[in-house]
Amino acid sequence: MYANKDFALNMIEYLLDQRGLIEARSRDVRLRLLDKVRVTEEKSYWQMMNLVLPLVLLILFGLGFHFWRKRRYARTTESYET
């Protein structure tokens, strides 16, 4: 494998104190592989989800913030005019 086990053990070692280090080293870490058939079937779905969803949320937040500021400062300027 790609040294994922070493990375996981080093990560646990960093987060635990010295007493827990011995316990962490003695644990058996199993890497669970992905289902290749399901990965090929859902690949484009997850790519689009990770590409489109953040952009849509960013646009919605920007539009909402724009209209909120426009409405907020429109009321402030009206009070100065009267």
Image: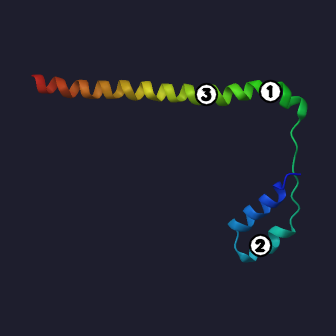
Task: Measure the alpha-carbon separation of dots 1 and 2.
Answer: 39 Å
Looking at the rendered structure, the secondary structure element under dot 3 is helix
Is residue 23 placed above or below 82 in the rendered structure?
below
| Residue 31 numbered tag | none
Q: Residue at label 2? A: 21
Q: Which amino acid type corresponds to the residue marked 2 in the rendered image? A: Leu
Q: Is residue 60 left or right of residue 32?
A: left
Q: Residue at label 1? A: 42
| Residue 53 numbered tag | 3
Circle nearer the N terminus (3, 1): 1
Task: Measure the alpha-carbon separation of dots 3 and 2.
Answer: 40 Å
Q: Position of residue 8 (x, y in %)?
A: 78, 58
**What's the residue at 89%, 61% (across, down)?**
28
- Circles 1 and 2, Cβ within 8 Å, touching? The answer is no
Coloring applied to the structure: rainbow
Q: Nearer the viewer, residue 44 or 76?
A: 44
Looking at the rendered structure, the secondary structure element under dot 1 is helix
Report the quarter where the C terminus lies.
top left
Local packing at callout 2 (Cα closer than 10 Å; few below 14, some 14-19, many 20+) is: some
Circle nearer the N terminus (1, 2): 2
Q: Which amino acid type corresponds to the residue marked 3 in the rendered image? A: Leu
Is residue 53 placed above or below 6 in the rendered structure?
above
